[in-house]
Amino acid sequence: MNYIRHLQLVYQQFLEDERLNPSHISLYMALFQEWNAARFPEELFINRQQLMRSSKVRSRSGYHRCIRELDCFGYLEYMPSHNPYQGSRVKMFTFRTSSKPVQDHRDPILEQVAEHYYPKYEPVDEPYINNNKHKTITNINSTTTPVENEIYKFFKTQNWPLEEAEKYYAYYQKEHWKTAKGIFITDWKRAAEKWMNRCYRWRKEKKEQPDYLKTSKNKNYEQPL
């Protein structure tokens, strides 16, 4: 398949299609990259997490909406799978001189050569979705949940009082070691350094704040007003 000619026609179609937004185009290009790496098979097994990372589509709902709409718009055929042992499939359409996509894009000779050097994607033997979840949980438990004594030692090496270490530990323990955006903390020492920097700036700003009311803490309440 002449992928350069295909991309030229696809970009022309993108230009004329008012239904598309940048997420559609980004996801299509991520799918095309996977299709190209697999030597343009008739059907392609896809990994949602990998495609979201490649296309920069952040939300799962946005990913599913875009890929279903690309199917409805005629750019591909999406075949979702609810089986954890088998990923979803996509059939990419080939665009030629006509504005309509063509499904039969294969050259028998090129298919034999591609199959010899790069076999088609096959379903994984293990449920890769569940494995990824388990790996994520393992990494979180092993790398992002520090021991309380380790935090005290780290704050002590940075010449910070124990009281500040207790505040840091209590805050993130309450937040289940997640950031304000809900992302798990992978480097608690780096988060602690940011905590120290914020405290330092806050103390400096508080110290430099002028006293507009000219008040004094050493007051003599025995004097009449």
Image (spheres, rainbow, N blue to C red):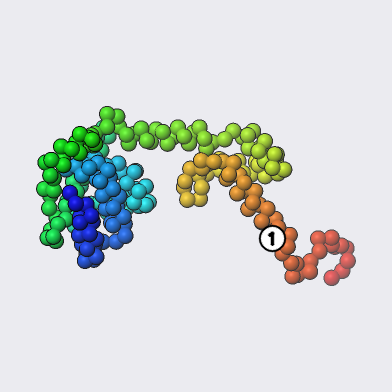
Q: Is residue 174 visible?
A: no
**Residue type pointed to by label 1:** Glu
Where residue 176 appears, as percent x and y from the top left, is 51, 41
The residue under label 1 is: 205
Q: Is residue 15 visible?
A: yes
Check the image and name the residue furthest to the right.
223
Residue drawn at x 59%, y 41% is 189
As drawn, 80 above or below 102: above
For the C terminus, the quadrant is: bottom right
Where residue 204 appears, as percent x and y from the top left, is 70, 58
Residue drawn at x 87%, y 62% is 220
As drawn, 134 above or below 37: above
As drawn, 113 above or below 94: above
As drawn, 40 above or below 11: above
Q: Is residue 161 left or right of residue 79?
A: right
Q: Element type at marker 1?
A: helix
Residue drawn at x 34%, y 43% is 49
Frontmost residue, 186 versus 100: 100
Q: Is residue 31 left or right of residue 97?
A: right
Q: Is residue 104 left or right of residue 166?
A: left
Frontmost residue, 14 versus 209: 14
Number of numbered callouts drawn? 1
